[in-house]
Image: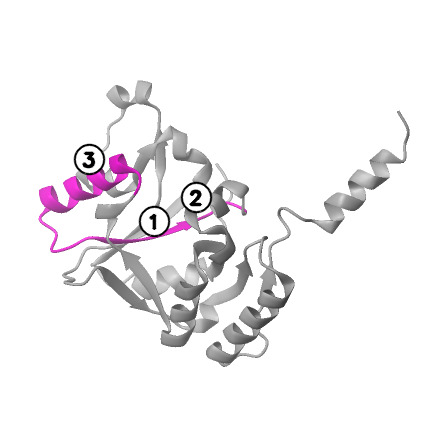
Amino acid sequence: MPKRQVHLKRFTSIGSAIDTLRNRRLAFVNPDKWDDRNDAEFMRLYRNRSGREGLKALCCTESSETYHHWKVFTQPADGCFIELDRRQLLDSIRADARYRANAVDYIHLNEIEDCDYDIASLPFLKGAGFGPEQEFRVIFEGACDEEVHFLTIDLAWIKRIVLNPWIAPTIFDSVAETFREISGNPELDVVASSLTNSQTWLRWGRSISRRGV
């Protein structure tokens, strides 16, 4: 069994991260417009068949960052992820029956006839093709007339914010300064991803090239 991660990553836009810092909140979105229509339909079925007043979702990942995450879950030049303390986030909703949280199970089509899931599982099931996402999902099942439900948070739950690997250095400096000012924490850990431009990786490649053919 994979080791449970201490932190959850929420991939989002820089603008959404600013909203989180300024207003001390996380956005749970309406699944009706999700790109994965299978996922959206499972959420609709769950909401309708279980008689829930509403259904909104906060989608995170337990995975280390990947190129896939940046390209699928963000607009590359405007993307970032917020790294959240898993325990503190889940403790904050534990006593509220309107919230549920679980890791997503990924199922192959040739397995579905042998699976024994019930209706409560529907929000946490996806096709195996999405498996590399390693998604951890929190859902809100209470009444909400807006497109977005907000969960109030403590900014101490945010362990760091990582900006996309394509951000220009001068823009990175401005965004990082803005994040720290808005949060009121001059020590807020804000870094740029080195996924596509790692100096450590490049030095290793150069060392290999010097070994000869």
Which quarter shows the C terminus?
Answer: top right
Please state which amino acid type lies under the numbered disc 3: Asp
Task: Report which quarter residue 38 is drawn in.
Answer: top left
Q: What stretch is highlighted in magenta?
A: 35-64
Q: What element carries label 1?
A: strand
- Nearer to us in this view, 164 or 46: 164
Residue 191 image point, x, y percent? 60, 62
- Return the mark for residue 72: 2
Vertical arrangement, residue 2 with respect to residue 146, above or below: above
Relative to 94, residue 51 above or below: above
- Which residue is tagged 3? 118
Within 10 Å of disc 3 (Cα), the crowding (few <14, some 14-19, many 20+) is few
**Residue depicted at 51% across the width and 43% down the height:** 3
Kind of residue at disc 2: Val
Q: Which of marks 2 and 1 is in front?
A: 2
Q: Is residue 110 left or right of residue 209?
A: left
